[in-house]
Structure formats: C-alpha cells, structure tokens
Image (tube, helix red, strand yellow):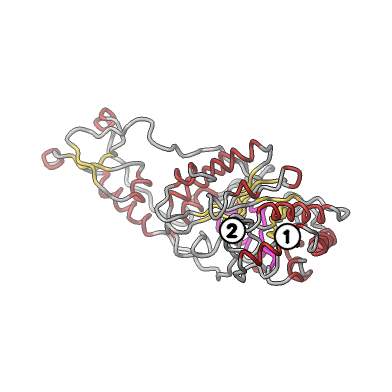
Amino acid sequence: MAPQQRPARTRRWPAGVAVIVAASAALASGPGVAAGAGVADVAAAPPAPAPAPTTSAAAAAPAAPKKDTPAFGAYLNYDARGVARIAELGDWLGGADLRVGHTYLPGDRWSNIEGAPDFLQDWANWRLERDDRIFVLNVPMLERNEEGLSDAQVRTLLRQGAGGAFDHHFRALAKRLVALKIPDTVIVPGWEMNGITYTHRCGPDPESWKTYWKRMVAAMRSVPGQRFRFDFTPSRGRDAIPWTQCYPGDDTVDIIGMDSYDQPRGMSFDEQVREPYGLQAHVDFAKAHGKPISYPEWGLFRNGDNPEYMRRMLAWMDEHKPVYNTVTDYCPHGVWQCEDNPEASEVYRQVLSGRTEEPTPTPEPTGPTTPPVTPPDCSPLDLGDWVEYWLGGKLCLRFDWYSRNR
C-alpha cells in the first residue's frame, strides 16, 4: 500500500472499557457468572470485589530498558515528521523502545528513487544515534510507480530493467546510503509485487521481474562499504499472481517479508493464517529457504476496529519472531495517529506498553481445547465479543437468582 500522511491526534479510552467496568460492577454482587467456569467453581467462588478506580496511570511503570530488545516500530510519515514521531509513539506506549524506523522513497521519478540527500538525512541521523536501530527503506523498482501503467508498458520496462538499463540508478542510491553512513539499511525493493497497485509489479513478466531484481541487488552490492539486507516482501495471499512465482532466489534475498493487513472483509485471523500464500505459507516458505521473516507493513483494514485481529497478529509475531515489524500508523490501518480504531488501539497499547525485552510467546489458540461448561439453571448473556474478551468469557444469569437474593 502507498504511504500516506495523517496528522497526529490525541488518544482516548475506548467506550468498551467503560462498558466492561460497569457490567463487572453490576454483576459482581449477584446473578452473573462466567459461562466458561466449571460448576464447582461457580458454587465455591466468593463474590467478586468491586473494581478499582480506572485511571490513565493505573498501569505499572515500564521496566528499565534492557538489551536484545525485539525490533518493532511503525510507519509514521515519510519525512522528518516520521522521525520525530518515533519518540512520541514510544512515550504513548509507556516508554517502549521502538528500534525500527521505516520510510519510502518517492516513486514518481528516478531522481527521487536515487534518494535525495535532504530526504534521507534525518533518517540517517536517527539511525546513527544508536547501534541497535534498524532503518528500513522501501525502494520503488520503476519510476511512475503509481500512475496505472498498462501491463504491456510494465512488461517493456521490466525487460529493460532485466537488461541493465536502470542499474546506474540503484548504484547511485547505494552510494548515497553509504555516504550517509547507513550502509546496513534494510532495502525493501518492489514491495507487494504480486498485486496490481504498482508499476513495479511482477505479474506481466515474472521471469523478467526476477532477473531485474537480481541486477538491482548486484548493482547495489557492487558499491564499496555496503552491508545492505534485501527484503522480498509480497502482500499476503495470492493476489494477482502467487508471490512464490516472483521469488528471485536465495542468493539475492536476505529476508522474506510480508505485508499483511486485516482483509478481505469477513476473513478471520485463522483464515489469514491458513489461506493459500497466507501467514503460515510465508513462515514455511522462509524456513524452507533458510531465511528470517519480517512484516514491513501490517495493520487494520477491511474489518474495521478489530481488537481480535490485533491480539492475534501481535501474538503471531511474538511466536514467529520476525527480524522487525512496523505497523502502518495512519487511518484506516493505524493505532496511534488514527482515532477510528479505539479498541484495537488499546490492545496494541496494552501489549506493547513499556516493552523493552524479548516477550514470552503467547500464541492464540485456533479454538477451545475443551467445550466451555455452562452451569445448570443458567442462561448465557450475549454482551458482545469485546465485553466477553475482557471478562474472560460469557456471563450467564441464574434462573433462581430472584429466590436466592430474597
């Protein structure tokens, strides 16, 4: 997806939190019990204490920063504003350590794809402040990258690239990055090549695309002092062409990434895992090729404010440990600069707040291992997925609640 610019906005607590607190307080003294609890537990459980007052300072203070911090960040803006917002997002996350900076070179003309110094300087300064930071740079493989060129035009350009016509542009970019003292930049060329959005797409001529990728990598690696890592990053799923048909080979790929948004409408996270060329296929393909994985773009999309997706995607990444991940933080995808996703935003904040060390993987189960037990003489209440998530299950109302409380 193309990067966009969105103004930063103040955050607010989701309305669902207030509903949960009110429901918990009302039900703690009487008829409500969790439908997932065993019958014996229901009978023996003492009345729940009243919930403590909720304030923005209720969370524990973040731990002191530690070494070996997992690398995560966000796309916050393409220019100097994106650099400045990294620290602001870290503050919003309770002092979490964001080690990844991510931006995109403009794909309008070759002079911009070569990386204008005034564009890259702020990112270089940020990267050089600490040795453990990662700078991720998406690089268009062709100019006029979002102008809707026909397949015939794209095919011609890919064949020109495969023949070496554009090598000098990528050598110029490599020299610029080395001169800026960021020769270890993670380069993401031709991202989402399996789709139809960009001129640098693979579908019109996969063989020429793969040859062109190899020439581009060779051109950039020919520059003395470079230590680039090249990240092959399709979009999740089959899209216009299976992304495996675009893979250029292990000798020119260092990381196998995936851009994975919560789409299409109605698709569950489990389906996103299992679909052809989906999340599990990505992990398996990378393992078979001996490559680490990444998620340069991910976030909410067609299914709106979806806290379940947010929990599951964060758990997935904790389990599979990508080299880095960067959430796309603008509407409709984002968590900090977008007010449209308050519930998912709060999940993101709770999971990552103060994170400064390697997390313990907590992957979500694909389904219950045993069916929930509903106590006898009890009618389950439908309070909605969001409330049930925070309460840990459904609540049910005893049929005899009136006589028990007379």
The vertical placement of 392 against 126, above or below, is above
Q: Which mark is residue 281?
A: none
Asked if the magenta segment contains residue 392, the reply would be no
Residue 30 position in % (x across, y down) = 22, 43
Between 132 and 275, the residue placed more toward the observer is 275
Between 290 and 325, the residue placed more toward the observer is 290
Residue 64 visible somewhere in the drawing: no
Give the side of residue 123 with respect to residue 321, left or right. Answer: right
Q: Secondary structure at mark 2?
A: helix
Q: Quadrant of residue 174?
A: bottom right
Give the side of residue 173 with respect to residue 258, left or right. Answer: right
Q: Secondary structure at mark 1?
A: helix
Which residue is found at the position 42% from the left and 48% from the top?
Answer: 268
Q: Which residues are magenta?
A: 83-106
Q: Which mark is residue 159?
A: 1
Tags 2 and 1 in contact by the CB under 8 Å rule? no
Gap between marks 2 and 1, in whole Å?
Answer: 47 Å
Reading the image, the residue beneath label 2 is: 91
Q: Quadrant of residue 215?
A: bottom right
Residue 307 position in % (x across, y down) = 43, 52
- The mark lying in front, picked from 2 and 1, is 1
Residue 198 position in % (x across, y down) = 61, 63
Which residue is found at the position 64% from the left and 53% from the top?
Answer: 98
